[in-house]
Structures are given as C-alpha cells and as structure tokens.
Image (spheres, helix red, strand yellow):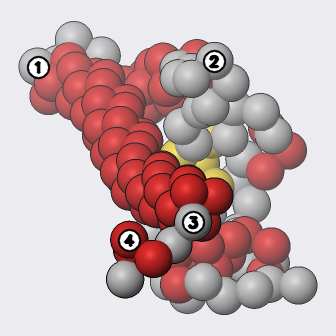
Amino acid sequence: MINNLSIMKKLLVVGIITFLSILILSAILMFNGKNIMIDEKKSKLINIVELSYSLVEAEHKAFKAGQIDEATAKQNAINAIKKLRYNGTDYIWINNDELPYPKMIMHPTAPALDGKVLDADKFNCATHLQYGINSN
C-alpha cells in the first residue's frame, strides 16, 4: 500500500507522524514538568512550615526552662515568623483553629487582620482552591 503512494504523499505521512510524535512527547514532558514543579512547591512549603515550627518550639523550650515568660515566648515566635519569606514574596501567617471560624493571630502583610475572626467568605479561598469551588 505504501509503495503505491507518491513521494509527496510519503513525505507528508512521515511529516504527520513526526509532528504527532513530537506533540505526544511534548505533552508527556509538560505533564511530568508540572508534577515536578508541584513536588518542588510542596517540598518548599514543608521546609518553611518546619522552620516555623522550629522557631515556635525553641521559644516554647525557653519558656518551659523558665528563661522567659509565656507572653514573651509567644511574641518572640510571632516576630520571627512575621519576618520569614520564601520565593521572594511568599510568607507564613498564624491563625488559630477555633470553630466555626479561626481567628488571625498574625498576618505579616495585612496587620489589620491580626485578632480578627475569619468568618467572611473571602477567607475560605484555600478551601475553595483545595476542593475546586468557584467563589465568584
């Protein structure tokens, strides 16, 4: 059957097969690249959370050892975490886990939120992103 095709048609078939192969390979590489980027982001987040936890833990140990009072330990931990940045501009904030709505303890870029109950729908964006809920 291929022998019956003209040279032009044979070249066209080879070109189409090559194009499709490159397209499929590109799609596979993009999918793998996306997974690698997600894994790197997860790793960075794990590291920054572990660092934050270490800062809190050090202050807690100082409090337990009687070196500082509880209020100072909490404020020291808050101040240290407030200064943390990763990826240049990303940051960690602290909120409690009260139900039905958490309360902001410290937000490094929006200090007006400190002490506020996070009951407004706009504060549910992480949950919306996690479960694919469109908040608009």
Give the image location of residue 45, x and y in percent: 39, 39
Crowding near the residue tagged with mark 2, few <14, some 14–19, many ≥20 C-alpha atoms within 10 Å: few
Q: Nearer the viewer, residue 79 or 31?
A: 31
Give the image location of residue 74, x and y in percent: 42, 32
Mark 3: amino acid:
Ser
Q: Secondary structure at mark 2?
A: loop
The residue under label 2 is 88
Q: Secondary structure at mark 4?
A: helix
* Quarter of the rendering occupied by the C terminus: bottom right
Q: Earlier in the sequence, mark 1 or mark 2?
A: 1
The answer for how far apart the CA atoms under marks 3 and 1 are is: 88 Å
Is residue 17 found left or right of 36 in the rendered image?
right
The residue under label 1 is 65
Crowding near the residue tagged with mark 4, few <14, some 14–19, many ≥20 C-alpha atoms within 10 Å: few
- Furthest-top residue in view? 67
Look at the numbered discs 4 and 3 and tell me whether their residues touch, using CB distance below 8 Å: no
The residue under label 4 is 3
